[in-house]
Amino acid sequence: MKKENRAAIDDLLPSLDREPRNYDVMVRLGQAYLVLDRAHDAAQVLKQAADLAPDAPSVLTGYVRALEKLGDKEAVRAILARLKQTGTAVEGPKRCVGLIDYLSLPPAEQRARYLANLRKTSVANPGDFPAASVDHRASSP
């Protein structure tokens, strides 16, 4: 994974040179830096992105993560206040726990849970699913 992020950085830097005001590229670059534990570099590029797009949730959440890794609690509070003003909830690591648990299940159990959730959702929101695409009966893996 780190090798992929190093390659991503190598790909993103020329993109940023071509489009120095593209905050989406900055966000992706900051995320790659964070994965490589380069929080200082991430914070620098995400600060630039925040200057360009001060209300963009993707920018602010990435910037918060970088500042948290740097231990800058005061700056984190300030950015979280800005995020709150935009009406965006900050996704923390605890929100991924269910996904990690799901992915650690055997494939047959993943499929069974997926189908059960799909059936439940299709019953709750029948207009969201074409009639022929979802079988409401229990299916075997």
Image: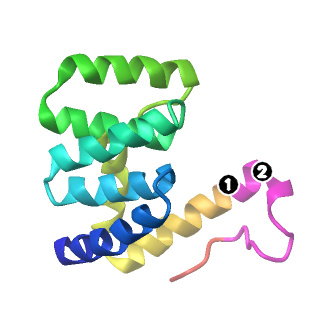
Q: What residue occupies the far bottom of the structure in this picture?
A: 141
Position in image of residue 123 (x %, y %)? 75, 54
Classify 78 as above or below 19.
above
Residue drawn at 47 percent across, 25 percent down: 83
Mark 1 — residue? 121
Which numbered dot is residue 125?
2
Q: Secondary structure at mark 1?
A: helix
Q: Position of residue 25 (x, y in %)?
A: 44, 58
- Label 1 Cα crowd, 10 Å radius (few <14 / some 14-19 / many 20+): few
- Secondary element at tag 2: loop
Residue at screen point 13% across, 54% down: 37
Q: Which of these two is toward me, 48 or 126?
A: 48
Instruction: Give the side of residue 77 with respect to residue 88, left or right.
Output: left
**What span is colored magenta in the figure?**
121-137
Q: Position of residue 92 (x, y in %)?
A: 33, 38
| 50 w.r.t. 83: above or below | below
State the image quarter where residue 74 is shown. top left
How busy is the neighbourhood of tag 2: few (under 14 within 10 Å), some, or many (20 plus)? few
